[in-house]
Structure formats: C-alpha cells, structure tokens
C-alpha cells in the first residue's frame, strides 16, 4: 500500500546541520511534501538564515520550494547567536553562489498560520530546527491553528547531555525559552530530538568521506560543511566528529524505527538565570506531571547515516 507523502513545514536557522536536514527532506519526495521553508533568527541573524535557506534549496535543485523569512528576534529577549560554531555566515565551509531563488514576500509566521488554516486539520507536521519563535508567534497570533497541527518534530533540549550553550541549556531552547514554553505547553503532539540523541550521530571521517565519495556537488558541499562544522564539538567534547543535530528530525519522519525514546513530561525553565532554557525532562517518571513529548534517547547511527547518504546521492 503506497502512502502519500507527509506534508511538512521546515522552520530553520541554517546552520550547516540545518542544511543537511533541508537537503534530506527535499531528496525524499516519496516520504515528504515540503510545503515551505521558514527562516528564523538563531545560529546567525535572520538576513543570513533566510539567505542560507535559499542557497541550500537552490543547491538541492528543488527551486519550486517556497522560502519565507520569519521572526528576527526571540519573543522577549535579545538574540543570542552561534557564529563560534557555524562561522560568521552561519554556513561556513564551502563557498556557495549567491542564490537566484526569491524570498517570498509573505511573513513566515503568516505562512504557517495560513497553511494550517487551509490544509485539512491534522495533516501538517511542523519541523522546527532552530529557536521556536516562529511557531510560538503563530500560536499566539492564531490560537485556532494550534489544534490543527498534526505533530511537531523538533530538534532541541537535553537531559543526560545537559547544555551546550550554558551548563543547563541547549541552544535552540535557550535562545527563546518563552517560545519553547508555549510550544511544550500547547498540547500539540511533540517528538523531541535532544542532544541526548544528536550527540550519537557524529560525522566520523568514514561518514564524511562517504559524502565526498558521492562525487557530486552536493556530496562535496556536504563534506565541506561537515569538515567546518565538526571542529567546535571535537575540540569541546573530544568527540570523533561533530553531531549532525537537525537531520535527525527529518530522518525520524522517514524512518522512525531508527529511533527510541520515552513518552514523558518535559517542561522549560524560563525564570532562573542559572538554568534558563533547561528542558526539565521527567525521564524517570518521578513526578505526576502529564506526558507531553516523545523524548528521543537513542538512534541506530549507522542506519541514520546510510539513509542520509543514500538520499543525498539523489540530488
Ligand atoms: O544545539 C544545536 C541546535 O542549535 C541545532 O539546531 C543547531 O543548528 C543550532 O540551531
Ligand atoms: Ca538549527
């Protein structure tokens, strides 16, 4: 029985790892129908995340894909960026040509609202790969769309791995904790890819050489993104490569069997300066707080990279 591709909106702050996620999604039309790509301020400011989004989509060749700019700052706080990880452009490594693809004039939050109102209820999945500002703004501006979302599959948070931007918090949640609180309390079915799982998908040399060995422009660019992106985590953690955080979101939609997790309660710290942005995950069930998220803890890493590489080879 053939299944129809799942309709998704990718919300993103590219970011080399975001780029892998966008390419994986666009290379998988039998599984995913990408209704739009919405840029958000995060790894780098919005003018760069929207420019990078257009560069990545253009590289994929899927130039009918609509790209939007969303929010340029968190709901209530100053923007915190991550050039120390991604470089000053946010997409350092290979040089990509200036894009010829247009940016849609509609605001990305408007696009999310309009799409959720137009498509049948529970048929659109949101895939946030950066701070949750756009999603939260859509829910604040149009509460009627919250109940129409099929699922949110996001990269963010951490429990056993603790923080990567502070001792307690992962970057995407830390940048906009108020937005994260809105999303985690929304009641929308959540699947969370925290550092606990993304730190298990490392760009080892063999995996990067498999990208390069595709002998395609996409393979070359992917290898050079990985070569640049991995250095920060390798120096910090002494790991055997960098964690490819964001494509775990897309891989989950295509091959959920590659992942394992628990349906638990996850709440967001928004008050304490010390632990701001911490995802307080009740992994051991020590509270009676209702479960609100499938929190992913493990992955078949070889299966993940086989899927990613096989799909990149299509572009
Ligand atoms: O903490 C990792 C996350 O922050 C990834 O999504 C990366 O792209 C950055 O947005
Ligand atoms: Ca990201």
Image (tube, grey):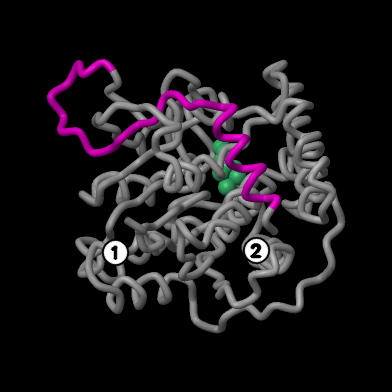
The answer to whether residue 261 of the structure is visible from this angle is: yes
Q: Which of the labelled discs sits on residue 123, or is there none?
A: 1
Q: Is residue 215 above or below residue 207?
A: below
- Please tell me how crowded label 2 is: few (under 14), some (14-19), or many (20+) other residues with Cα within 10 Å: many
Q: Quadrant of the N terminus?
A: bottom left
Q: Give the Cα distance between marks 1 and 2.
A: 24 Å
Residue 13 in the image: x percent, y percent? 59, 54
Report x, y in % for residue 159: 41, 23
User: Picture coordinates of residue 128 (x, y %)?
Assistant: 46, 52
Residue 138 placement, left or right of 87? left
Q: Is residue 287 magenta?
A: yes
The image position of residue 61, as x and y in percent, is 70, 69
Say whether marks 1 and 2 touch (CB < 8 Å): no
Residue numbers of the magenta segment: 284-313
First in residue order: circle 1 vs circle 2? 2
Q: Is residue 249 left or right of residue 150?
A: right
Q: For ligand 2, tell me if the residue under mark 1 lies within 8 Å.
A: no
Element class at badge 2: helix
Residue at the spot x=72%, y=16% of the render?
Answer: 238
Residue 276 visible in the current orientation: no
Crowd rating for badge 1 (residues with CA inside 10 Å; few <14, some 14–19, many 20+): some
User: Mark 2 highlights which residue?
Assistant: 53
Q: Quadrant of residue 297?
A: top left
What residue is shown at x 28% (from left), y 37% (from top)? 293
Could you say which disc has been placed on residue 314 in the image? none
């Amino acid at each position: 029985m053939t299944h129809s591709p799942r309709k998704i909106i990718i919300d993103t702050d590219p970011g080399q790892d975001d780029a892998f996620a966008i390419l994986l999604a666009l290379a998988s039309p039998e599984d995913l129908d990408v209704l739009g790509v919405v840029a958000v301020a995060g790894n780098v400011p919005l003018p760069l995340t929207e420019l990078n989004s257009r560069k990545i989509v253009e590289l994929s060749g899927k130039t009918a894909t609509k790209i939007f700019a969303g929010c340029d700052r968190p709901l209530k706080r100053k923007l915190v960026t991550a050039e120390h990880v991604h470089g000053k452009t946010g997409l350092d490594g290979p040089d990509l040509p200036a894009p010829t693809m247009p940016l849609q004039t509609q605001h990305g939050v408007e696009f999310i609202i309009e799409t959720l109102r137009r498509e049948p209820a529970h048929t659109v999945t949101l895939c946030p790969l950066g701070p949750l500002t756009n999603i939260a703004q859509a829910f604040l501006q149009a509460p009627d769309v919250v109940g129409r979302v099929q699922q949110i599959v996001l990269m963010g948070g951490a429990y056993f791995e603790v923080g990567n931007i502070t001792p307690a918090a992962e970057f995407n949640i830390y940048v906009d904790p108020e937005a994260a609180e809105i999303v985690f309390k929304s009641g929308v079915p959540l699947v969370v890819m925290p550092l606990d799982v993304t730190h298990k998908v490392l760009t080892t040399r063999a995996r990067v050489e498999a990208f390069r060995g595709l002998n395609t422009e996409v393979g070359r660019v992917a290898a050079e993104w990985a070569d640049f992106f991995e250095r920060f985590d390798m120096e910090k953690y002494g790991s055997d490569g960098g964690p490819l955080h964001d494509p775990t979101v897309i891989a989950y939609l295509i091959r959920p069997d590659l992942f394992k997790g628990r349906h638990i309660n996850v709440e967001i710290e928004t008050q304490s300066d010390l632990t701001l942005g911490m995802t307080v995950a009740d992994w051991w069930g020590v509270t009676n707080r209702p479960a609100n998220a499938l929190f992913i803890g493990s992955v078949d890493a070889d299966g993940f990279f086989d899927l990613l590489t096989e799909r990149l080879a299509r572009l």
